[in-house]
Image: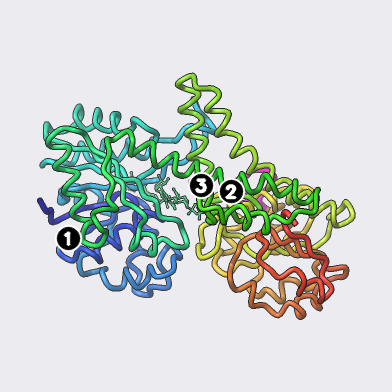
Amino acid sequence: MKIKSICCIGAGYVGGPTMSVIAQKNPQLKVTVVDINADRIAAWNCKDLAQLPIFEPGLDKVVGEARGQNLFFSTEVDKAIDEAEMIFISVNTPTKTYGAGKGMAADLQYVELCARQIAKVSKSDKIVVEKSTLPVKTAEAIKDILDNTGNGIHFEILSNPEFLAEGTAIQDLEAPDRVLIGGEPTETGQEAIEVLKNIYATWVPESQIITTNLWSSELSKLTANAFLAQRVSSINALTELCEKTGANITEVANAIGTDSRIGSKFLNASVGFGGSCFQKDILNLVYICKSLGLNQAADYWEQVVIMNNHQRTRFANQIVKALYGTVADKKIVFFGWAFKKNTNDTRESAAIYIADKLIEEHAQIQVYDPKVTALQMQSDLNYLNSRSEPENAKYLTTHSDPYDAVAGAHALAIITEWDEFKTYDWRKIYDNMSKPAFIFDGRNLLNRSALESIGFLYRGIGQ
Ligand code: NAD
Ligand code: UGA
């Protein structure tokens, strides 16, 4: 069975790119992406494709091809729900900041609101697809709401978690390792799975479309992120040991990663993982384990986050220690603020926490990032609530030119692995800095010996 019209609630980092690719690959399918954030929708509809609300390589081309043909962005949520045969829920599911489970559980209020709205508006049978990352068993709650507050029509729930990574979203969507669809074992459940499968099968080989029950699908998403984050924390846990012993983390990562059972990906030592999902999803997993009385499993996974927090603090402390124990009134430049390269997303970026710690020591932070705005950096820092907004503005300033940014700086910290940093004229940067000039390479991105030959005091992470 094929359907003609789908909609997606939530035009964020997942909803926007995912629906754009689905629309491009299914020209006969009408795809409407809705959001309550009118500014975001206006940006998705902007004629100038450089103004799309999220920066993602290749996204402009896909949107340019499909928008206005079979891809639409709108704030008319009710209309889109009413028209669609299949509705994706792709709203945010952040960590709860209040009440029971504060700081750990997923805040499901936005998901619940979507379910209630779908129940209220729908006049014909619908397939509701969980695209957001959700705690295992959420489909049960969604089904309860739909079945008990709806208009007596039939709702089928599917879980179809998204595995794209920011910065490579289009690539990941166009050639996914797998697509995962979970549904109920009933006849209507299996039919719904087939409908969604047909949409993906227009470009994803069927052998890569995995179908499971609802709970396996929900849990697989949370645990895939936990496994990935665990790799980063595992390699970061070795950086301190390398620094103490003279082993080199890049050499160690290469040596262990060539074992095909271990694999080479996701073994880059860093200032710590950031992004909107790893921390929240692991904490959510920890909370679920704790709620079920599985305390050892909870402690095991929580350690991944504890290690990550330690790595960020350790990096900030290293800077203070190397700069002779004080950074008060010293100018420290950050190259990069985004949580990884090729995105303008800064959620949970290590930069925010490292800047906060250095500002506590009264350092003057100046940041250059190719894609993140000054406003975003200030609001990230203000969100931590460590000090007043005017104080943050005094301690953190932004530059649009990397060479100007380093003028008179005592130290430079590489926070994000943007490719352009590798192409800089590092002699010019050295000349502009105060001496001795330190580089703290939080991504082991640069050529150590080349920098040392210029005169820099190079500090790699785990080197
Ligand atoms: P996001 O914050 O960028 O986007 C969510 C959007 O939903 C926002 O624009 C918000 O305004 C909108 N929204 C919230 N409630 C709404 C409502 N009731 N009606 C209409 N719109 C509403 O979030 P995101 O990064 O796209 O993540 C969405 C989900 O996907 C999360 O569960 C996340 O864990 C998961 N996920 C994210 C990524 C990623 O790389 N960002 C990857 C895989 C999965
Ligand atoms: C991650 C997963 O990779 C996606 O599969 C998943 O869909 C997504 O979370 C999600 O659910 O939101 P994302 O957070 O966008 O994607 O980016 P990653 O590439 O996973 O990087 C996360 C963080 O880990 C970044 O700060 C990155 O710099 C860091 N990292 C990654 C390292 O420090 N070292 C590595 O070797 C790899």
Percent x, y of residue 27? 18, 66
Q: Secondary structure at mark 3?
A: helix
Residue at 66% x, 70% y: name it: 399
What whole-number distance in Å separates the C-alpha atoms at marks 1 and 3?
Answer: 34 Å
Name the residue that disc number 3 marks. 228
Percent x, y of residue 102? 52, 30
Q: Which of these two is toward me, 82 or 30?
A: 30
Q: Earlier in the sequence, mark 1 or mark 2?
A: 1
Name the residue that disc number 2 marks. 232
The relative height of residue 173 versus residue 273 in the rendered view (above or below) is: below
Residue 29's tag is 1
Q: Which of these two is toward me, 442 or 333?
A: 442
Q: Quadrant of the C terminus?
A: bottom right
Mark 1 neighbour density, 10 Å: few (under 14) some (14–19) many (20 or more): some
Query: What kind of secondary structure does the magenta stretch mostly adopt?
Result: helix
Give the foreground label among 1 and 2: 2
Magenta extent: 380-389
Percent x, y of residue 227? 50, 43
Percent x, y of residue 353? 66, 48
- Label 1 within 8 A of ligand 1 by Cβ: no
Residue at 47% x, 22% y: name it: 291
- Look at the numbered discs 2 and 3 and tell me whether their residues touch, using CB distance below 8 Å: yes
- Label 2 within 8 A of ligand 2 by Cβ: yes
Residue at 45% x, 35% y: name it: 106
- Look at the numbered discs 1 and 2 and tell me whether their residues touch, using CB distance below 8 Å: no
Does the stretch in magenta take in 385? Answer: yes
Return the residue found at the far right.
324
- Label 3 within 8 A of ligand 2 by Cβ: yes
Q: Which of these two is toward me, 167 or 261?
A: 261
The amino acid type of the residue labelled 2 equals Val
Q: Secondary structure at mark 2?
A: helix
The relative height of residue 195 versus residue 149 in the rendered view (above or below) is: below
